[in-house]
Structures are given as C-alpha cells and as structure tokens.
Image: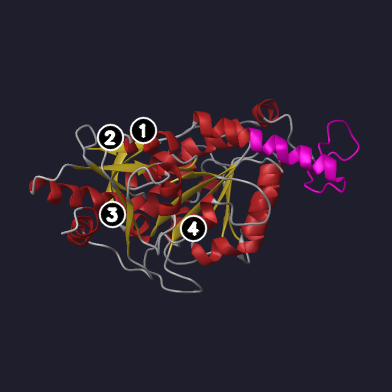
Amino acid sequence: MKEEARLMKGNEAFAHAAIRCGADGYFGYPITPQSEVMETLQILKPWETTGMVVLQAESEVSAINMVYAGASCGKMVLTSSSSPGVSLKQEGISYIAAGELPCLILNCMRGGPGLGTIQPSQADYFQSVKGGGHGDYHMIVLAPCSVQEMADFPSLAFELAFKYRNPVLMLTDGVVGQMMEKVVLPEQKPRRTMEEVVKQCPWATTGRMGRGNSNVMTTLELVPEKMEDRNTLLQKKYKLIEENEVRVEEYHLDDAEYAMVAFGSTARICKSACEILRAEGIKVGVLRPITLFPFPKKQISDLAKKVKGFLTVEMSAGQMVEDVRLVVNGAKPVEFYGRQGGMIPTAEEIAESFKAQLLKK
C-alpha cells in the first residue's frame, strides 16, 4: 500500500495506520466512541495481507493481558478502548510498565465518572499522565488533535515504545475519534521477521523454558532492596524521556502577551478563541502539549517569563491545569476554564472566560 489521501474518521485512520506501520497484533473490546478501530480492522482483514492478528477479546482485562503477552515476545502489539474500558486495563498496564515492555494503547476519552456519557471528554488526564494503575510508573503520552495525527502517531508511538521499552498511550477523545478530515495515510511498512525481532529485542521471552535463551518475564520481586533498585532504574529512564522527548505546538506565541494552554481537540477550539481575541487587539497565543508525559515544563517556564498570564482550557473540572500551575509556581496567574460531562466549549465561551479572568472584563 502506497501513501494515499483519504477522507475518514480519526478512529479509522488509527486502524489503517496500525496496519501500515507493521503492527503484529491488535487485541481489543468494543466501546463507544472508539469502536470503529476494531470495526475497521475487521473490514480490512490484515491477517490476509500483512499477517497482523486482530482479535476481539472477551473483555478489556483479557485484551490488555494479550497485549502483555505479545509485548513480552518483542512483538508490535496494540489495543484501544475508551475511558471505562481503560480503567479496567489499569492493572495490566502497570504490569507492562513494570516489565519495561513496548506497546501502544489508544484511549478515546468519553465523559465520566462511571459509565457517564458517550460524548467526548478530557477527564482521563490524571489516569493517563499520572500512571492510573498501582505503583510508580509512567507511560509516554501523545495527545493527537487531528485525524492526520491519528494516522501519524502510531508509527511514532511504536518507535518510542521500543526505544525506551515503555508503553505509549495515545490520549484522544470522541471529537478527534469521530470527526472526518482529509488524511494522508503512510506507506505500508513490512512486518519484522523473527530474526529482526530477536535482534531488536534480545530481552524478549522465547517460550523455550530451560532450553537456551528463555528470558522469563516477571514483575514480582520479594526482596525490598531489589525492588527499590528496579524502581530507581525506572525513574532514571523516565528522566531520560523527559530530557529528550518533549513535543509541543506553538500558535501565535512570538508576540503574545497572554497564553492559553490546551491539548487535543480543545487546542483547536482555543486557536479559534485566539483569533477572536486578536481581532479585538488582545495578543494571545496557544501552547499545545503534544506529549503530556513528558510534560513541556521548560517551554511553559520560558513562556511564563514573557507573558502576563495563562488560561488553561480542558474538557474536565481541571486536571492539566495543576501541572501548569506547578511549573509557573505563582510567577504569573494561571486561570482555568472547562466544560464537563461531555460538553464541548465554544471559542466564544473561551474568549469571554479569558477576558473575565485575565483582563477582569
């Protein structure tokens, strides 16, 4: 399959990209608003063309443990779900992070808590960026804001996952997952041969118990000192990721006197709010974190030296705003505007909130 332009939903683009980046297997369970991922894979039947396995598990718990097994073998494996489903996957994600195994997880967020609504939300920030499951661990978190990035990020995600032996989460929402845009799909990459897998992943288990290179995967350690050593190594890895993998998008920040901070689909709306405010002579820009972990601490800290204040916008009660405030550390005001339960803010609402909170109008 050559590179080609298509009109499709974000979820569909993600499914196409998973095949085209050479993935070995997808294990999932349907839940709105991400069900098109599995539906698209079932329509495309990659097991007949690339050999990619596509399996609907009996539950989210089963799906993430299938990913755990495939990742243990050095395979390029992925899963997708939405907020309540990702909650069920948390134990398995913690095991994968502890085992330092590469995989890709898509969370297409919906409103909660509980079963909530099938409408979009961004209230899984804490769950995703702070770990979610038990123990001290991080996933690398990418936040796409367009259908094109839903197609581009799977390849990047696997690259980072294998580079750092770490799970990567693509954190999107029902807006990006369901909306249709023109997208340029990548060219098909060949799946790795077993020899290439063994060379790239000498740590992977082979299943040959007691016969040569068996590499038994376990996250259990009964000696506290050894468990602390393992945790120390994980923290060193996360520090290295923070030093090398921060990604942001800047919009109208060169001459900005104020800044909005938003991720995903909300950042798109903030750009429109920015244009409304600039038409009124107010110099506002937008900083969009593309990586939520690692969080763009330096970029926000540098921005705090030149702007008069920040407005953080989220489809939640306010989660990322805590990280922005930690970075700014009181040097400048950091205000918040959010909608909850599946409600999507408008550009006009954001502009009015900006003026009311930062300009006191």
* Disc 1: which residue: 302
* Disc 4: which residue: 38
> Which range is magenta?
207-236
Q: Quick check: 155 left or right of 335?
A: right
Mark with earlier residue (1, 4):
4
Q: CA distance from mark 4 to mark 3?
A: 17 Å
Mark with earlier residue (2, 3):
3
The amino acid at mark 4 is Met
Q: Secondary structure at mark 1?
A: helix
Name the one closer to the observer, 16 or 279.
Answer: 279
Q: CA distance from mark 2 to mark 3?
A: 37 Å
The amino acid at mark 3 is Met
* Disc 3: which residue: 180
Q: Position of residue 21 (x, y in %)?
A: 48, 37
The amino acid at mark 2 is Lys
Q: CA distance from mark 1 to mark 3?
A: 36 Å
Toward the left, the furthest residue is 280
Q: Are marks 1 and 3 in contact (CB under 8 Å)?
A: no
The amino acid at mark 1 is Asp
Q: Which residue is located at x 66 percent, y 52 percent? A: 94
Q: Are marks 4 and 3 in contact (CB under 8 Å)?
A: no
Neighbours of disc 2 within 10 Å: few (<14), some (14-19), many (20+): some
Mark with earlier residue (1, 3):
3
